Image (cartoon, grey):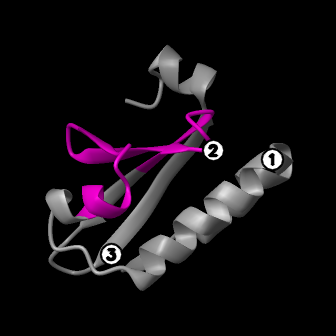
Amino acid sequence: MHTLSRKKLRDFWQRHPDAEIPLASWYRLMERGIYRNFAELRMTFPGVDKVGDLYVFNIGGNKYRLIAAIEFEWQKVFVKNVLTHQEYDRGDWK
């Protein structure tokens, strides 16, 4: 899959340095993977949830949340936001 907006990942891990390794790992797995649907995505990312039209990934042992829009047909991932667990729980991202 082609992952758009890697800059959001870099910006986040500059503020939260411990997020760099898990976010970089997520990025590599997404770039190397071919996922045709949510079920196939969950085989690689068992902690991903679908919330409306978005996909929420648990990152760094559930410490962070990555929110993305995915176009399976076009093999594109759009990173919408990366949040701490606390920021995610506030719900402002919805």
> Which residue is labeled 1 in the image?
18
Asked if the residues shown at circle 1 and circle 2 are in contact, with their CB atoms under 8 angstroms apart, the answer is yes
Q: Secondary structure at mark 2?
A: loop
In the rendered view, tell whether residue 69 sits above or below residue 24.
above
- Disc 3 is placed on an element classified as strand
Viewer-proximal residue among 58 and 9? 58
As shown in the figure, which amino acid type bears the numbered disc 2? Gly
Q: At x 16% / y 73%, what residue is drawn?
A: 36
Q: Is residue 17 visible?
A: yes
Mark 1: amino acid: Asp
Task: State the image quarter where residue 15 is shown.
Answer: top right
Q: Earlier in the sequence, mark 1 or mark 2?
A: 1
Does the magenta portion include 79?
A: no
User: For the residues marked 1 and 3, what is the alpha-carbon distance in whole angstroms?
Assistant: 26 Å
Q: Is residue 8 visible?
A: no
Q: On the image, numbered disc 2 is attached to which residue?
A: 60
* In this picture, residue 77 sits left or right of residue 20: left
Q: Is residue 33 left or right of residue 20?
A: left
Compared with residue 15, is residue 39 higher up or lower down, i.e. above or below? Answer: below
Give the mark nearer the N terminus: 3 vs 2. 2
Q: Secondary structure at mark 1?
A: helix
> Which numbered disc covers residue 76?
3
